[in-house]
Amino acid sequence: MDADWDLFAVVRSCKSTVNKPAASSGEPSNRPSKVNTSGCNCLASLRLEQNFDPFSFRSMSRASLEDSRQPVLKQPDPTTMGTDRGKNPIILSPGGGGANGQQQQQRPRQRVQQRGVPKTRRRSNKDMNRTVVSHVTDENSCSDQWTWRKYGRKAIKGTSYLRHYYKCSSSAECTARKHVTLSNSEPGTYIVTYTDDHTHSMPDSRKSRAGGSRMNKLPNADNNASSSSSSFISPTAPPPAPEVSATATATATATNVQNAGDNGAKEGENVNIAALVNDDGEDIFMIPNAQFYDYLFEGLGELVHGADSGSGSGHNWPAFGGNLSSWGSSMSGSSAGSTAARSLWSLTSVILFILRQDK
DNA sequence: CGTCTTTGACCAGCGC
DNA sequence: GCGCTGGTCAAAGACG
């Protein structure tokens, strides 16, 4: 397979009856934040904003995310929720500190930092640069090519779960951060919020993994491994790569069901099928009952265009290392097909979530 | 030794 | 102005 495989494949709705809000003027600002038509009801939960990177997940610790599944309280206690002050009710070890939940020796914890030293500890929203939110349905989708270091977690008022804070560990100057919270209303759905951009290129591979092995350790890893669709996709062990050509494109055609057995629809009935096809028009995979608006994929269209243009600058799409044109070649450590498979898998995760919302 | 997670403490933004 | 809240720091130990 071509080593410079770029993911040009996009997914679009195959239902011609989808009402596209407004004209295809490509003005994101004119788009409704929520589409209250029968055409699509997925946007309420999947907000696509500038530089939104639904596939930018990789290095999130599975154990950490699993920890986020632990409710802070089975029944949130209003007297303790929403405040830290060392009163986190999920605390298991009395001494604080300690990796992987192992109990550590209790010792007084002294604050070394001097009071009065001016240091911005919290940025205002206006100082936040490009905060984006995505919802992912499983923990394997909460990891990405970037290297993140967890620097905190906190019980958030109004949710029973902890919010985990990560900062980019690839560069000390990089201000990119993200936090992950298990959705209170959508169990199994993680709300990932990104803040700021990476100020560096995507690392070819993770730095030293010293201490990193714990990331895959889970007390109940077996239980999770057997839990249906949430199989963990290791960055180094991607799923089998579908045979997708480098120039796979999307189609948007009305689809009549010709194989009623596939999705339960009757023959001749119109259904919505999200199809990922290659440039030969062959379906790579199809998802029934999916509805998308074209504008969801306008960015992807730009992606394809940018990559095709060969301008050298490429397109700033963080999931692909900030430069789609070089994305494939930058992933020298893995086969292009595997890279594609990971991206497809991540894309599938997003789609599956949309489908859930569409029910 | 370098990097990781954990977690108490600190602090600034915000609402009242 | 005050208290609540969320975001961040940094010490400590774990891990390879």
Image (spheres, coloured by chain):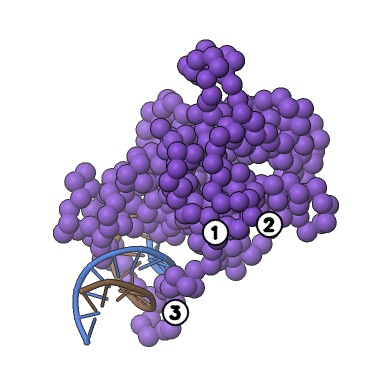
Chain colours: A purple, B brown, C blue
Q: Amino acid at mark 3?
A: Lys
Find disc 2 in the rendering and name its residue: A316
Identify the element where label 1 is drawn: helix
Q: Amino acid at mark 1?
A: Asn
Find disc 1 in the rendering and name its residue: A30
Q: Chain of mark 2?
A: A
Comparing A140 with A294, the one in front is A294
Residue at (30, 56) in percent of width and height: A155
Q: Amino acid at mark 2?
A: Asn
Quarter occupied by the C terminus of chain A: top left
Comparing A267 with A298, the one in front is A267
The first of marks 3 and 1 along the sequence is 1
Find disc 3 in the rendering and name its residue: A119
The first of marks 1 and 2 along the sequence is 1
Label 1: how many Cα within 10 Å (few below 14, some 14–19, many 20+): few
Comparing B8 with A175, the one in front is A175
Do labels 3 and 1 touch, CB within 8 Å? Answer: no
Same chain? Circles 2 and 3: yes
Per the model, the C-alpha gap separating discs 3 and 1 is 39 Å
Within the image, what quadrant is residue A157 found in?
Answer: bottom left
Q: Which of pointers 3 and 1 indicates the residue nearer the eye?
A: 1
The first of marks 2 and 3 along the sequence is 3
Per the model, the C-alpha gap separating discs 2 and 3 is 31 Å
- Judge whether A195 appears above or below A101 on screen: below
- Indicate left or right for A252 with A112 as reference: right
Identify the element where label 3 is drawn: loop
- Judge whether C13 appears above or below A339 on screen: below
